Image (spheres, coloured by chain):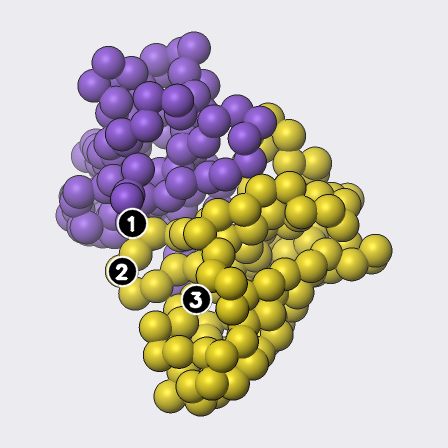
Amino acid sequence: DQQVKQNSPSLSVQEGRISILNCDYTNSMFDYFLWYKKYPAEGPTFLISISSIKDKNEDGRFTVFLNKSAKHLSLHIVPSQPGDSAVYFCAATVYNFNKFYFGSGTKLNVKP
Amino acid sequence: DSGVTQTPKHLITATGQRVTLRCSPRSGDLSVYWYQQSLDQGLQFLIQYYNGEERAKGNILERFSAQQFPDLHSELNLSSLELGDSALYFCASSVDGYGAQPQHFGDGTRLSIL
């Protein structure tokens, strides 16, 4: 049973525009969410996180939005750059529970 | 460079065999996690160790086992291998595994079962 879902396997965006990556979850117990970026032949790299007590967290060009009622989070990248081309995974956990549930990833292609 | 080292990078073996994957965590990290990523799938959490002790368990098969040694490196043992075990296996580490600390991932071991 997949508790974290990324329904868009891929996304293509023009350089300079906004990239919006979406993630849905089913477990209402999740209270902490993370985004990771993965380049080919490398392991995932932590990007940004958000606690369920917030609905927005921003770090430079990256902003994560959390809609608890819809069990939905999104990652906004503005402006998008070619170097952002990678696979993006969202992950969810229950704080202190130590099990992290990952989505299947969205491959972002930023075209110059 | 995440500081997490996984060996080997690639492993090719046959069904029924047994393999050991090795992970050295980032310096100072006490907690190690193992994940399996099958083709076009997300990362599936297998198991977590903290300072030598098992802390959390995911959907790890009984044919799989892991341990964390006193020097904090960890090994994932896969036995009676089946074709479906072909996957990327990632190790990650974090400082102490409390809260929801971001994990630092190694580059993975690609296991191919022929």
C-alpha span from label 2 to label 3: 11 Å
Amino acid type at circle 2 is Asp
Tell whether B53 sits left or right of B82.
Answer: right
**From what the image shows, is residue B37 above or below residue B109?**
above
In this view, the residue in front, A76 or A99, is A99
Instruction: Please state the horizontal and vertical placement of residue A13, each as a whole percent of the image.
Output: 17, 43
The answer to whether residue A108 is above or below residue A43 is above
**For the C terminus of chain B, which image quadrant?**
bottom left
Q: Chain of mark 1?
A: A
Query: Is there CB contact under 8 Å for labels 1 and 2?
Result: yes
Evaluate whether label 1 is on the same chain as label 2.
no
Chain of the residue that carries numbered disc 2 in the rendered image? B
Circles 1 and 3: CB atoms closer than 8 Å:
no
Q: What residue is shown at x 26% (from left), y 17% (from top)? A: A67
**Amino acid on which the number 1 mark rests in the picture:** Ser
Q: Which residue is located at x 72 percent, y 56 percent?
A: B68
Mark 2 and mark 3 lie on one chain; the one further toward the N terminus is: 2
| Displayed quadrant of residue A24 | top left
Crowd around label 2: few <14 · some 14–19 · many ≥20 (10 Å): few
- Which color was chain A given? purple
Q: Which residue is mark 1?
A: A104
* Pointer 2 residue: B40
